[in-house]
Image (cartoon, rainbow, N blue to C red):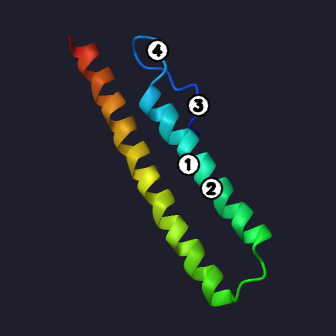
Amino acid sequence: MAHISKNTVTASGEYSSDIEKCLDGCKEKFNQILFGVINEGNQDAHKMEASIFKQLMKLGFILMQLYFASQKSLLQKQHRSTE
């Protein structure tokens, strides 16, 4: 299993701001989901389930942004190494 650190460094030694933004967004959205599950327990199960899935779709979108940001960073690194 890969571990991604917020301190992901590009080939030039700079932090990838796109990756950092996505990581922060993932952590924030995940914590929002956890908070909702723990603190909004008075909802009917089907309403909670719907809320969880709706928020997971938003988390999935952020994760896809992270995927594309990391691919962009990888391609830039490969391009620099071939120059």
Q: Which residue does the numbered mark 2 point to in the structure image?
A: 30
For residue 6, what is the image quadrant?
top right
State which tag comes first along the sequence, 2 or 4.
Answer: 4
Of the residues under marks 3 and 1, which one precedes in the sequence? 3
Q: In this view, does 36 lie to the left or right of 61?
A: right
Of the numbered discs in the image, which one, if any, rests on residue 80?
Answer: none
x and y, in percent, of residue 10 in the image: 43, 20
Callout 2 amino acid: Phe
* Residue in the image at 51% along x and 71% along y: 54
Check whether the beta carbons of the residues at disc 1 and disc 2 lie within 8 A of each other. Answer: yes
Q: What distance separates the C-alpha of mark 3 from that of mark 2? A: 16 Å
Q: What residue type is labelled 1?
A: Cys
Question: Tag 4's secondary structure?
Answer: loop
Can residue 2 be seen from the camera position used here?
no
**Distance from the alpha carbon under mark 1 to that under mark 2:** 6 Å
**Secondary structure beneath label 3:** loop
Asked if residue 27 lies left or right of residue 34, the reply is: left
Q: Residue 45 in the image: x percent, y percent?
A: 68, 88
Report crowding for label 1: few under 14, some 14 to 19, many 20 or more residues within 10 A (C-alpha). Answer: many
From this view, report whether residue 61 is shown above or below residue 11.
below
Residue topped by disc 4: 14
Look at mark 1 in the image and give the residue it sits on.
26
Quadrant of the image occupied by residue 5:
top right
Callout 3–callout 2 Cβ contact below 8 Å: no
> Up-down: is 46 above or below 69?
below
Give the residue at the far left of this rendering: 83
| Residue at 48 percent of width and 41 percent of height | 22
Task: Name the N-terminal-most of marks 3 and 2.
Answer: 3
Q: Which callout, 1 or 4, points to the residue nearer the camera?
A: 1
Q: Of the residues shown, which amino acid type is indicated by label 3?
A: Lys
Instruction: Tell me the number on the disc at residue 6.
Output: 3
Tell me the quarter of the image containing the C terminus: top left
